[in-house]
Every structure is written in structure tokens, then in C-alpha cells.
Amino acid sequence: MTRDGYVARWRGREYHASPDGDDIRLYQPGPGEGFTEVRPGRYVRVVPAAEVDDLAYVRTTCTWQGQPFIVLAEHEGWLRLEYTGGRWPVAEAMGLEAFDFGVYQGWAPAAEVADLGEQRV
């Protein structure tokens, strides 16, 4: 499983999270005490930021064809990657799409990706 987003530790458990000023929105896939369903399979609870033990941004990193990437998504054996090497000639030679100025993305077969790991920022 790849992750790219905020996580918060609250009452000894880690949740997907979203900071919102002095509050943190915690998300989980099923019902729980104080959680409200916002759509099928997605429940939220808002807690004061002061009650959260830890808040961090987590992203999944990897290498593909010897170059550094962030994993943005996964779908049916493919990974959506964003190049973090900062060299446009390399990104262009790899056939990556120019998503925005200086931002290059592409799909790679998951079997070709190496060094998958999480980075807390």
C-alpha cells in the first residue's frame, strides 16, 4: 500500500488526517465512536489539534530506472510516479509527462520499481 498525505496519531492509533486550523480531521474506513459517515466507507471525526500525539506528512518513495520518484497512486499493477531528480533532460528521456512546470509524472509497472519506502516529512 502506498501513502501520500497526512497521518495523525490519536489515542494510540494512526489515522489518515487533514489539518484544519486548530482542529484535525481524522478518517477511517468504518464506523467508530464519534465518527460520522461522510460517504460510504469513509468516516470522519474532528478533534482539537492539542489532543493529537503526532501529525506528519507521509509519502511513499522509490526508484525507477535508477531515478528517484514519489509514488502518487497505484492501479492494477501500475504505479503513478512523480520524478524528484530535478533534471528535465532525464525526465524527458524517460518519456515522462510534463504535468506542470518542472513537474514530471508517468506510469510504471510496479514490478520494475525498486526501493519502495515511506518518508515522514
Image (cartoon, rainbow, N blue to C red):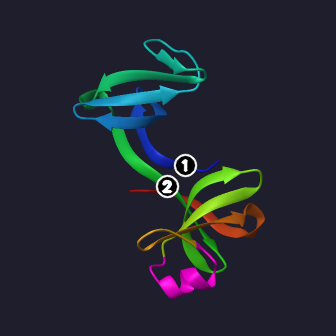
Q: How many marks?
A: 2
Residue drawn 67% across and 79% down?
A: 65
Evaluate if marks 1 and 2 touch, with contact meaning CB atoms under 8 Å apart: yes
Residue drawn 44% across and 79% down?
A: 86
Residue drawn 48% across and 72% down?
A: 84
Label 2 is placed on what type of residue? Arg
Residue 64, image quadrant: bottom right
Q: List x then y, in percent, for residue 40.
A: 60, 20
Q: Which residue is mark 1?
A: 3
Residue 100, image quadrant: bottom left
Q: Residue furthest top?
A: 33
Seen in the picture, residue 48 relative to 106 is either above or below; the reply is: above
Q: Which residues are magenta?
A: 85-96
Question: Looking at the image, which is closer to me, 19 or 99?
Answer: 99
Label 1 is placed on what type of residue? Arg
Q: List x then y, in percent, for residue 48.
A: 27, 25
Q: List x then y, in percent, for residue 115.
A: 63, 68
Relative side of 103 to 74, left or right: left
Q: Secondary structure at mark 2?
A: strand
Q: List x then y, in percent, for residue 99.
A: 50, 66
Badge 2 local density, few (<14 within 10 Å), some, or many (20+)? Answer: some
Relative side of 71 to 51, left or right: right
Question: Looking at the image, which is closer to me, 101 or 112?
Answer: 101
Q: Could you tell me which quadrant the C terminus lies in?
A: bottom left
Compare marks 1 and 2 and give the one earlier in the sequence. Answer: 1
Residue drawn 49% across and 55% down?
A: 59
Q: Which residue is mark 2?
A: 59
Seen in the picture, residue 84 relative to 42 is either above or below; the reply is: below
3D distance between C-alphas at marks 1 and 2: 5 Å
